[in-house]
Image (cartoon, grey):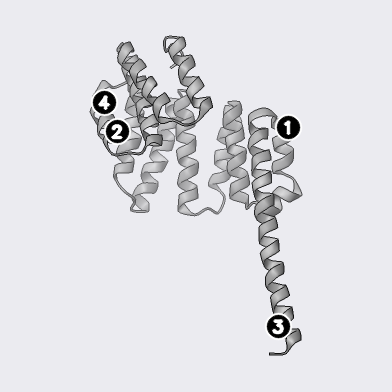
Amino acid sequence: MDNRILIAVIVGILVVVVMNLVRKYLEKRYTIKLMKAIMTDEDEFLKLVDSFMVKYLFPPYNREFMRLNNYIARGADKKVKEQISLMEQMRMNRNQRFAVYQTAFQYFITINSESNAKNMQRKMNAFIDENKLDPEMKKTIDMDMKMYFDKDISTLPYIDEKLENCDDADKAVWNLKKAYVLKANQKLEEAKECIRLVMQYTNDPTQKQIMQDLLDNNLKDL
């Protein structure tokens, strides 16, 4: 091979490698900026998410999913619903579509909007059937409805079963759900013990503080 051709190939490879490294660096940098803005400054977030650089670095789904999370963080119910409707019209793979439904479902549970949660439940169940996904997913969704809206104490054995075979992050989630059901059924001390387990299983200092605040307030905000 001619030396000039070899040099050109090597230079081309180096340029691609450098460009990929720069892109990864920028993606990380802008992800941090976007997440910080979601937590602190909505105007800054909206300015960033619609900027040329963010549009260049992130595909439409990623940007719109971040926008959805921004509205959720703000408790902007109307905008959350509008954003979900917008995203349902987007081209998404099945994992992305289910992530939108799941995020919306959890949000509607959080704000105690049973009708909207039921609507998301129907969409997720239909999606699970159409895509031949694990039927256990439907059971988990149904159990969440029973836990949060019916406050059904009969869900506790199901929660305990889940706790037996999951990692620490999931144990934190399931113990929090268990605490909610126990507290709703006047089993306050057992609920507090679950909150202590959440603190044990989570590594996030912010989450630990939130759990401690719940304990300090006798679980009034749970």
Question: Which one is earlier in the sequence, the residue at label 2 or at label 4?
Answer: 4
Decide: is 68 above or below 55: above
Q: For mark 2, what is the residue?
A: 163
Q: Classify mark 4: residues with Cα within 10 Å, few (<14), some (14-19) or many (20+).
A: some
Question: Which of pointers 2 and 1 indicates the residue nearer the eye?
Answer: 2
Give the quadrant of residue 85: top right
Instruction: State the image quarter where residue 157 is shown.
Output: top left
Q: Which residue is mark 3?
A: 6
Give the Cα distance between marks 1 and 3: 50 Å
Identified by mark 1, the residue type is: Asp
For the residue labelled by badge 3, is the local secondary structure a helix, a strand or a loop?
A: helix
Sequence-earlier tag: 2 or 3: 3
Where does the image place residue 57, in percent across and percent down from the top left? 67, 53
- How packed mark 2 is, by other alpha carbons closer than 10 Å (few <14, some 14-19, many 20 or more), is some
**Quarter of the view holding residue 182:** top left
Which amino acid type is marked by label 4? Answer: Leu
Give the crowd class for mark 1: few <14, some 14-19, many >=20 residues within 10 Å.
few
At numbered mark 4, what does the secondary structure look like: helix, strand or loop?
A: helix
